[in-house]
Image (cartoon, rainbow, N blue to C red):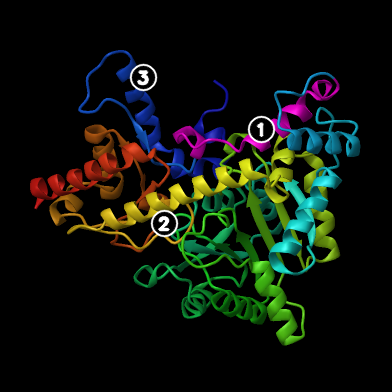
Amino acid sequence: MYFLIDDLNPSVIQAEYAVRGKIVAEAAQIEQQLKAGKEFPFKSIAYLNIGNPQALGMPYQTMLREFIALCMAPHILKTNTEAFNPDAVSRAKDFIKENPAGIGAYTNSLGFESVRKQVAGFIKNRDGYEAGEIFLSNGASSAIRDVIQLISGPEFHFFLPVPQYPLYSAALALNSADYVNYYLDEENQWKVTVKELKRAYAAARHQPKAIILLNPSNPTGSILTQTELLEIIEFCHQHTIAILADEVYQENIYYGEFVSVKKALKVFEETRKCQGPVVFSFHSVSKGYLGECGLRGGFMEVVNGSKGLMENLRKLASISLCSNTTGQLAVSMMVDPILNATWKTEKESKLGLMKQKADKMSRLLNTQHMKCQPITGAMYAFPQIFLPAKFVQAHENPNLEWCVQLLRTRGVVGVPGNGFLQVAGTYHVRFSVLERAEKMDGLIASITEFHEELWKEWE
């Protein structure tokens, strides 16, 4: 028999992605059983495990879809466009004029030049500084994987946050890359502190060369201020550490303001009159108020990259030929939207609703045996769940078992905290805040009731 487990790449076997792990697989089985008529204590499955906005009813931006539709079928522009908004028609005509090969042909390996120019303009407007080199990508994920693949090595440590998004630990495992954990301060709203970075640096077996920084954070929802970013950049500058800045939730800001690592870097360089660390910044159409996860559009900006680094990043991009063109169109609209009344109304409605649901979830997931920090950004609650000692002793993986029982008794899918890494002896669960508003109160009540019933059973 070919390809038994021992014949497979051990790095792939080692990699894990908890967001779509065991819990989700069992939920899919239960969903099929529900459709077949089997009875459960619930009528449907609530998938709170993933930031997939449109799967949970969030509407798309009308102008974005009309623009893409017209670029997909440009013959419509020559016949009857009455069903389309005139602004979308005008934008599509401009795109086709600038890109006459359309979207069925390969683009430049870095993406449509016209879209990359739009991204550069977006970055300059956002930060007040010229953009670095732009790479369009299949979501943020493909660019992140390329960077990790390129800079990994046998004596190369990454700083990996705890908690972290499992894409990173999986990508590191796939590249046999080593890492040292730095811990976010939960009692201080999940902040990153330089004191903790110094501790982690001293604990590393090899000198760390890159830090993974999620801002806003997934799964914690915390946001870094410019002052905090400047402290981190100073630390990285002192130790020649590159920064991988995951900024895909920059539109999901409920309190405070978003400051990009790139902007903070330029402030640092102007103040110190020096060149700062290399920064790779990532953004995506999957999050924010677009929620276009399926279109797989994103971009990476690279600042202060050496000639050799940039040549090899371009090589990796060329091996994949180009990112998908539909995703590139979505990036075009994300960074340079049609700011008519329709766009603005849809945007404000969606962001306002997400803020309301984030506030509600962070407030109601604070009970006698559960504690949730305020959600200031992103799309998730990450409460700490306190478990009875007998429950912990009775289960090999109590965090996973808690989520399994929540699914089997309440039909709610969460992600156990150990899938994101967590402080030893603590237990967490991640829930998205994206469920339909009319279901949110009932789901939160179901979660807290389940937890209190578990305490009564095991206390």
Q: Is residue 55 magenta?
A: yes
Tag 3 or tag 2, which sits nearer the N-term? 3
User: How far apart, in angstroms, are the residues tagged by discs 1 and 3?
Assistant: 31 Å
Q: Please, what is the dominant secondary structure of the magenta stretch?
A: helix
Q: Nearer the viewer, residue 231 or 162?
A: 231
Camera-nearest residue between 254 and 10: 254
The kind of secondary structure element at disc 2 is loop
Q: Residue at x 75, y 47 (%)?
A: 136
Residue beneath label 2, please?
421
Q: CA distance from mark 2 to mark 1?
A: 37 Å
**Along the line of sight, which residue is nearer the eye, 284 or 288?**
288
Q: Which residues are magenta?
A: 53-78
Residue at the spot x=26%, y=39% of the render? Answer: 442
Q: Is residue 89 magenta?
A: no
Instruction: Give amino acid for label 1.
Output: Arg
Q: Which residue is mark 3?
A: 32
**Crowding at label 2, few (<14), some or many (≥20) Cα neighbours within 10 Å?**
many
Q: Which mark identifies residue 65? A: 1
- In the image, 190 versus 178, the foreground residue is 190
Question: Relative to residue 326, is residue 367 drawn left or right?
Answer: left
Q: Are marks 2 and 1 in contact (CB under 8 Å)?
A: no
Can you give x and y, in whole percent of width and height, for residue 290 in the image? 59, 43
Mark 3 neighbour class, 10 Å CA radius: few under 14, some 14 to 19, many 20 or more: few
Q: Earlier in the sequence, mark 2 or mark 1?
A: 1
Residue 120: horizontal and vertical position, in percent?
78, 57
What type is the residue that disc 2 sits on? Leu
* Distance from the alpha carbon under mark 2 to that under mark 3: 31 Å
Determine the image quadrant of residue 112. top right
